Amino acid sequence: MYSDQICPFCWIGFKRITKAIEQAKNEDLPLDFSIKFAPFQLDPTIPDWPESYNKLERYEKKFGKDRVADMIEAMKE
């Protein structure tokens, strides 16, 4: 699974895959699962592990407030 800490859709994808794995386990399907994370750098201008930063502010700076509002609605759906 490729993931970037700034990407909200990476988190949504992770939650969906873990839910699907749990569902398969609950149905006793004869499957084994292993998730391996790989880095994906969505925004190379973010410094490594900043002491603190606000993701919403970062999104607004990168995409603009109006687009971020639309993105948040899409994430909620």
Image (spheres, rainbow, N blue to C red):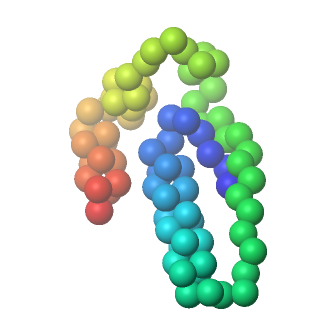
Using residue 13 as the reference point, say whether residue 62 is left or right of it: left
| Residue 61 visible to an observer of this rendering | no
Can you say whether 77 is above or below 59 in the image? below
| Residue 57 visible to an observer of this rendering | yes
Q: Position of residue 32 (x, y in %)?
A: 75, 74
* Quadrant including the C terminus: bottom left
* Quadrant including the N terminus: bottom right
Q: Residue at x 34, y 30 (%)?
A: 56
Using residue 63 as the reference point, say whether residue 36 is left or right of it: right
Between 19 and 1, the residue placed more toward the observer is 19
Q: Position of residue 72 (x, y in %)?
A: 30, 47
Q: Position of residue 31 (x, y in %)?
A: 73, 81
Using residue 18 as the reference point, say whether residue 65 is left or right of it: left
Using residue 11 as the reference point, say whether residue 24 is left or right of it: right
Q: Quadrant of residue 43?
A: top right
Q: Position of residue 55 (x, y in %)?
A: 40, 28
Between 77 and 63, the residue placed more toward the observer is 77
Q: Residue at x 31, y 40 (%)?
A: 68
Can you say whether 34 is above or below 6 in the image? below
Q: Quadrant of residue 41?
A: top right
Q: Residue at x 74, y 63 (%)?
A: 34
Q: Residue extending furthest top?
A: 51
Can you say whether 71 is above or below 16 in the image? above
